[in-house]
Image (cartoon, rainbow, N blue to C red):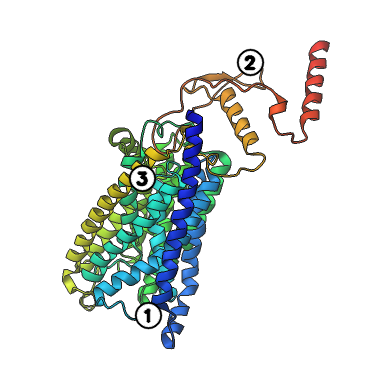
Amino acid sequence: MTDALSLTRKYSEHAVFGILLLLWETFILVILSVWATYPEGEGALEDAALWYQARDVSVMIFFGFGFLMTFLRRYGFSAICYSFIIAAIVCQWSIVLELFFEELHYGASFDNRREIGVEKVLNGLFCSGAVLISYGAVLGKINPTQIVVMAFLEPFFFWLNFYVSFLTLEALDIGGGIFIHEFGAYFGMAMTLFATSKRTKGHPDNVSSYSSDIFSLAGTIFLFVMWPSFNAVVAGAGTPQVRALVNTFVSLCGAVISTAILSRWLSGGKFEIVHLQNSTLAGGVMMGTAADLNISVPAAIASGMVAGAVSVLGFRFLTPFLSNRLGMQDICGVHNLHGMPGVLGAIISVFATTGLGQSEPELSEFPHGSRQGGYQTAAIFITFGIAAGSGLLTGFLIWLIDFWSPVPSDDLYNDRGYWQLPSDYEWVVERDDDSDAEYDDGNGEEMADMEGGGAEKSKKPPRKTRSNTFLRPQGVRKKPSNNNNNKINHGNNNKSKAGEESSSSSDDSA
């Protein structure tokens, strides 16, 4: 009876997911069909010129973010494809919402067609980035319908915050340190309060593997290379854009150096891969708000080093504390990569816009002159409040959906529940489990070396989950029976049998 109910819920979730996504896309089509047109004339030429850097931002969103999240050993399809789907729908939805809030700000007539060009597409990519940051906090813990609900609601609050902090207060944020990174991180952290439970902690699949970490590193490198374009694409032509490009690049390099140093110092003399995957990018986030300001190149490098160090310390100490003590299980560590560096970068902009390192003519170019720092400070707190409040609301709705169609415990952090899997998936999983049973006893005790016949001992520490310090369940799982009928034939059975016969004959002769 229980199995039948679970099956019914699964197919109900599948139907609701498709219906919601179809209705959402249809609504966007209808709105844009009566509201949108293309830019023309000189405006069109200027708009088209944005695409060369907007293309880099597109690579970051559709490739970088998705691959960065592939570290979970059995969640690769979901990490990449859910990010792909989220970005595709949010980019469109963002255009509608941006037009709506611009109408409210400049006079709500809603009776004229509005121009949709590359700039609107670029802003849609920025909005998608914020949603993907939030998704990283709950990676592997929510089903596709819950993802659709999150992706529908968050852009509305993203643009509400933009309306208040940028259009009304005129806060400066050239690379989204406040509006994208801070907002996305704390929206996601608020959601984790409703997406964290005993089932999600200490889960055996909330771990990485060698190959999954390499794929995640590919996302890191792409994000690193493209990040200067992300921060500089909307900067003013000439000196401001050069500043944004140079400051972002050197800040990223500074973050790499401090990450490499601290990672070894805090990890027993060895590098920790999660630091290299994430903390190395904190310099780009740090420059998000102040990238185009005259802060000097050495200050940008030092800022990046501080960002990398803070991010590593966050992964090492703060993430376990938030998970174990406050029930905020941050799977991707978005608080360490986006939240804290984003706020620190915003604080830099407060000092820079109050006159530190700026000349009087430059101060006069700010919307509020020498008082701009106060508006920057207000934007930091307003963004945090809107992000946390809307994240709690969205998390509550996701929690309600979980009562109707929860992700089964066995399918957490796993592609199994929602994907048609390739023929070798279960075989790979089974081999992984075999390896765990042979080598991982859950408490790091010395184990006999397989090839040494027990003469030599090797010590292999247990795997750790990515988001907290919980170790995998104690004790060795029962090793699966050696039943070739349940395994996919990869053409090695004859070789295996031959090996067994050879081994047996060797033993007899001995």
Measured from the top left, where is residue 63 in percent x and y?
A: 52, 57
Q: Give me the residue at 61% from left, 18% from top.
A: 456
What is the distance, in whole Å, between disc 2 and disc 1 at their CAs? 79 Å
Mark 2 and mark 3 lie on one chain; the one further toward the N terminus is 3
Horizontal side, residue 9 vs residue 107: left or right? right
Q: Give me the residue at 46% from left, 54% from top.
A: 19
What is the distance, in whole Å, between disc 1 and disc 3 at their CAs? 36 Å
**Residue 398 disc label:** 3
In this rendering, the label closer to the viewer, 2 or 3: 3
Q: Is residue 484 above or below residue 245?
A: above
**Residue 500 disc label:** none
Q: Give me the residue at 36% from left, 45% from top.
A: 398
Crowding at label 2, few (<14), some or many (≥20) Cα neighbours within 10 Å?
Answer: few
Q: Is residue 390 above or below residue 466?
A: below
Q: Give me the residue at 42% from left, 52% from top.
A: 148
In this rendering, the label closer to the viewer, 2 or 1: 1
Measured from the top left, where is residue 114 in percent x and y?
A: 37, 78
Crowding at label 1, few (<14), some or many (≥20) Cα neighbours within 10 Å?
Answer: some
Q: Are marks 2 and 3 in contact (CB under 8 Å)?
A: no
Residue type at tag 1 = Arg
Measured from the top left, where is residue 229 in percent x and y?
A: 44, 67
Q: Are marks 1 and 3 in contact (CB under 8 Å)?
A: no
Residue in the foreground of this view, choosing between 312 and 80: 80
**Residue 455 disc label:** 2
Residue type at tag 3 = Ile
Residue under label 1: 113
